Image: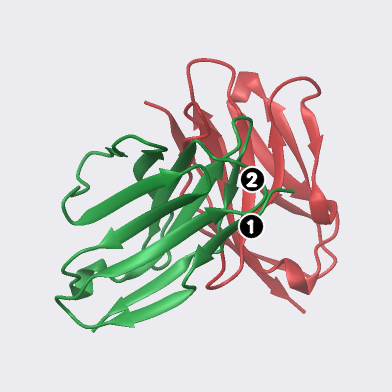
Amino acid sequence: GAVVSQHPSWVICKSGTSVKIECRSLDFQATTMFWYRQFPKQSLMLMATSNEGSKATYEQGVEKDKFLINHASLTLSTLTVTSAHPEDSSFYICSASSGAEAFFGQGTRLTVV
Amino acid sequence: AQSVTQPDIHITVSEGASLELRCNYSYGATPYLFWYVQSPGQGLQLLLKYFSGDTLVQGIKGFEAEFKRSQSSFNLRKPSVHWSDAAEYFCAVDQGAQKLVFGQGTRLTINP
């Protein structure tokens, strides 16, 4: 099956700093990538849809200025959490669409201290 | 709006026993349905999916699921569970273009 790599797997940062998470489709081109967020013991909630070469579409309630998404190529999307606060601590998972199916990365555990 | 409900937050079964995890969906058209498994701190692994055709779908690790349109259900089953099946299981429906809506998840515990 297709492989989606997410980096880093985990990150700890200080309050007020920014963190960038990468999502790469390794063996296929993904015109669309999705970013999900998962709080402990909860389900995955879609944050935004990232389309190559255009602005991301954010779900209701997600701050676009806080969660910056860039999809500069057909194999890479990045999520930058700006001015991170402890309440941003969560598990972030990306998925990449091959056009027929979405494949998930392994997730990034973000802890803001 | 599409939604997915997993009525059971936590299920405990004995090793070797059969398993059924429930999933109900709300979707106007023929749904594309998925079951994923997540081990602690890990990403999602696709167990199986239903797009069309045979309503009984076979997946990996001995899992199967049956799509029942009349009941808006897509329950996951396994005849005999193994200790390694302990994990969180998510049912999901495709809203379109592979944008998924997930259920709340069911945590499976296996008793030895």
Identity of the residue drawn at 64% across and 20% down: B69
Q: Residue B24 or A90: which is nearer the viewer?
A: A90
With A80 as the anchor, is A15 left or right in this view? left
Q: Which residue, given by chain and number where applicable, does mark 1 sit on? A: B37
The quarter of the displayed image where residue B81 is located: bottom right
Q: Which mark is residue B35?
A: 2
Secondary structure beneath disc 2?
A: strand
With B32 as the anchor, is B97 left or right in this view? left
Q: Quadrant of the C terminus of chain A?
A: bottom left
Crowd class of label 1 (few under 14; some 14 to 19; many from 20; radius 10 Å): many
With A36 as the anchor, is A96 left or right in this view? right
Placement of B87 over or under B7, stated as above or below: below
Chain of the residue on which disc 1 is drawn: B
Q: Determine if residue A61 is in view.
A: yes
In the rendered structure, which amino acid carries the disc numbered 2? Trp
CB under 8 Å between discs 1 and 2: yes
Placement of A80 over or under A11, stated as above or below: above
Establish whether labels 1 and 2 are both on one chain.
yes
Identity of the residue drawn at 46% across and 72% down: A8
In the rendered structure, which amino acid carries the disc numbered 1? Val
**Percent x, y of residue A23:** 48, 57
The shade of chain B is red
Q: Residue B100 or B71: which is nearer the viewer?
A: B100
Inter-mark Cα distance, 1 to 2: 7 Å
Q: Which chain is green?
A: A
Chain of the residue on which disc 2 is drawn: B
**Residue placed furthest toward the top:** B29
